[in-house]
Image (cartoon, rainbow, N blue to C red):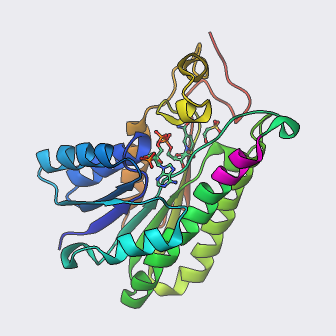
Amino acid sequence: MIKTALVTGATAGFGRAIALRLGKLGYRVIITGRRKERLEDVAKDLQNIGTEVFALNFDVRNFEASQKAIESLPEKFRQIDLLVNNAGLAAGQAPFDKCVLNDFERMIDTNIKGLIYVSKLIIPQMVERGSGHIVNISSIAGIDVYPGGNIYCATKHAVNAITKGMRLDLLDKGVKVSSISPGMAETEFSLVRFDGDEQRAKSVYDGLVPMDADDIADALEFIITRPPHVCIQDILLTPSAQANAYVSFRK
Ligand code: NDP
Ligand code: 8X3
């Protein structure tokens, strides 16, 4: 039977690569994001590899919009076997005293509350069926805290606590819960973090080879292709030149 996956934040970066990988693995894929044109492009890319795809255009920060979107799914896409909670962002990297409150709120609302909203809308059907898999995209920032990482790191620490909590609560319900904790990967992440400043975004990866979105799709593929009796709880992966969230070797 064809399985269905929902990937949040599939208009770019990890989410797009994961959606395409799931398509290649034979999943039916629901892609989500705020940028409609991008969603259409990713939907076309999926259709070109023969994947059945449905695009949902909503902001994960808005519970009512998320609910309306998920409730609008056609019958064929309603049973969600795999949820990839990927939508997220960092906003700025200033010391705490210099940060803009709105940046804190955007990160908390997207990375924590958005993940909770979408999960809350999808987990009940998994519990009812007694099967499902949730993969939360966390970060090395959920393990270490680096200067200027303050609230971004806090949101990913929260994602890790939520992941552990979900795993405990869903243990007897047949639902697996995993996370992926990437270090530096070149996507639109730094461009978003530094508000479109291309030079600053590029400089994050100066002197080292960062991961790319396909490296994270590889981790996802490993997690979801384990046999039923194995749950990969977390995969922490970094560029070879990164030791932790704040020590990297740059040539
Ligand atoms: P990108 O900026 O390339 O992609 C982020 C995706 O999230 C986009 O598709 C964006 O879609 C979506 N998104 C952001 N805000 C919202 C929102 N409010 N509602 C719906 N969708 C939203 O970044 P990455 O692919 O790198 O990041 C993906 C995840 O991986 C994030 O959770 C990030 O924290 C995490 N991560 C990234 C690392 C990196 O180095 N790149 C390392 C570790 C973790 P749209 O704008 O169209 O809504
Ligand atoms: C993104 C990776 O190192 O910028 O989660 O926090 S890092």
Res. 225 in view: no
Residue at the (74%, 52%) spot, across then down: 154
Tell me if residue 187 comes above or below residue 224 in the rendering.
above
Q: Residue furthest bottom?
A: 128
| Residue 250: % across, % down | 64, 14
Magenta stretch: give its range: 100-107
Q: Main secondary structure of the magenta part?
A: helix
- Foreground: 30 or 220? 30
The image position of residue 153, as x and y in percent, is 72, 47
* Residue occupying the point 36% across, 87% down: 129
Horizontal placement of 250 versus 130: left or right? right
Q: Is residue 136 left or right of residue 19?
A: right
Q: Position of residue 145 (x, y in %)?
A: 77, 42
Vertical comparison of 143 with 84: above or below: above
- Count of numbered labels shown in the rendering: 0
Q: Is residue 70 magenta?
A: no
Left or right: where does residue 160 sit relative to residue 57? right
Can residue 175 be seen? Answer: yes
Q: Quadrant of residue 226?
A: bottom left
Residue farthest along the top direction in this orientation:
251
User: Looking at the rendering, in which quadrant would you find the C terminus?
Assistant: top right
Give percent across and percent down for residue 118.
Answer: 48, 69
Instruction: Tell me, yes or no, whether the highlighted magenta stretch contains residue 103.
Output: yes
Q: Residue at 48% x, 54% y: name it.
A: 86
Residue drawn at (70%, 36%), measured in percent from left and top? 245
